[in-house]
Amino acid sequence: MKLSAASILGAALPALAQMVNYSPSRGQGITYTVSLPSSSAQSGRGDLYFQIKAPISYQWVGLGQGTGMSGANIFIMYAASATNVTLSPRLGKGEFEPRTDPAARITLLSGTGIENGMMIANAKCAGCASWDGGSMDFKSTSTNWIWAMKQGSAINSQAADADLSMHDSRGNFNFDLTRAAGGQEPNPFVASTSTSPSGSASASAPAATGTSSSGGGSSEQGGGGPTASASKLDMVLTAHGSVMGIAFLLVLPLGTLLLHLLPASVAHKAWIHGINQLFGLALAIAGLGMGIWFANQTEQLKKAHPIIGLVVVSLLFVQAIGGVLAHASYKKTGARSVAGLGHTWMGRALILLGIINGGLGLQLAMAENREVIAYGVCAGVVGAGFLAFIGWVEVRRGKGAVGTPATTKERGTAMSTA
């Protein structure tokens, strides 16, 4: 059979496509590959091609342009069925789950899907030279990229805004895009030569084990992203966590302890308790306000953490009213009333629920391991100590050491709550 020069050249061109790739040491089997058409390499703008490849044992795998989550242009691949993958374009606005980017211009190419135990997303990005929060020079010899992964069972969703669990490991690396120039259009991943990237990478945590599962999906672009600046979001998030931590790990438990540990000779114990708890309530209200604002900006109002937080703080108002009624009843009768009993146990439950919800907040914010560990230790100590204290109080009450009828003088200064 006679072959023309044109047909021979056409068959050879895909093999000339240049690429750079990177495989993180803590992401076994994961490979990120980038290729640039000659026109993009020459102009510094235009289309960029990339491939994300990973075993199906990963729940999700992400690639991003930038030095960190804040301001990054992120692409996350996860399974949506047994044969396809979803590629979700997202914008990083801080150290929390990135939201979908409605302005992303992503096209999935042939070769995308799940086969032989591997998830593959071949994509063309028409807006990767600049995005809301950053830009990248396609002529640079050292461009900044980030990666992250989570092992576990398949998400199996075609939705681009699927909820993501916190990463098991993440890191940074660099690509010399001048070595990726010359990628064959419209799909450089059909056949190509490949070179390694310049630079190095570092992971922040060891990879966790998980169960493997097949799945897949299609690219979707939708949903709105945060409207506030990344720095403001991070500042509010930090303030929210700090204020709520002080309220539920220190102030509110302290108020309970003071009521029972202050000697009987201390006048106005009920007032001391009440003022302390009102201060804790004020902190909780301030923290709730910041949390609602942040959740609204990041489209997380329907998540468990903000819903539980709203319920807990709302019930703290009821708790305050119950405290007033319980105090009035105790002053009159010198014995525990139904209002006092409800006030006691609801207060205990709300403090413990608030402590637990703090852990859910850290999970939602995709906090660093050191932050999770620090909070876990503090919450564990306070929670265990608080439960032990409740047990001690109830044992003493059962023996008649607390909660017995008070004298007229005592009724003016005591309050049967915990």
Image: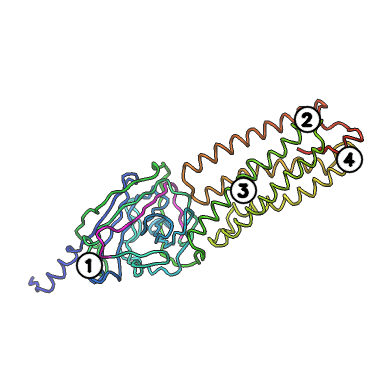
- Please state which amino acid type lies under the numbered disc 2: Pro
Nearer mark to the viewer, of 3 and 2: 2
Q: Is residue 3 visible?
A: yes
Instruction: Tell me which amino acid carries mark 3.
Output: Met
Q: Is residue 159 visible?
A: no
Q: Name the residue carrying label 1.
A: 184
Spatial CA span between label 3 and label 2: 29 Å
The residue under label 4 is: 331
Q: Residue at x 72, y 29 (%)?
A: 392
- 3D distance between C-alphas at marks 2 and 4: 18 Å
Mark 4 touches mark 3? (CB < 8 Å): no
**Residue 170 is covered by the magenta coloring:** no
Q: Closer to the camera, 170 or 70?
A: 70
Question: Which of label 2 and label 1 is nearer to you?
Answer: 2
- Which stretch is magenta? 138-157
First reached walking from the N terminus: tag 2 or tag 1: 1
The kind of residue on which mark 4 rests is: Lys
Q: Amino acid at mark 1?
A: Gln
Q: Earlier in the sequence, mark 4 or mark 3?
A: 3
For residue 46, what is the image quadrant? bottom left
Cα–Cα gap, marks 2 and 1: 82 Å
Asked if residue 113 lies left or right of residue 242, the reply is left
- Element at badge 3? helix
Please state the total of marks drawn on the protein image: 4
Residue beneath disc 2: 263
Q: Residue 15: where, in percent of width, then height?
A: 17, 62
Graded by Cα atoms within 10 Å as few (under 14), some (14 to 19) or many (20 or more), the crowding at tag 3 reads many
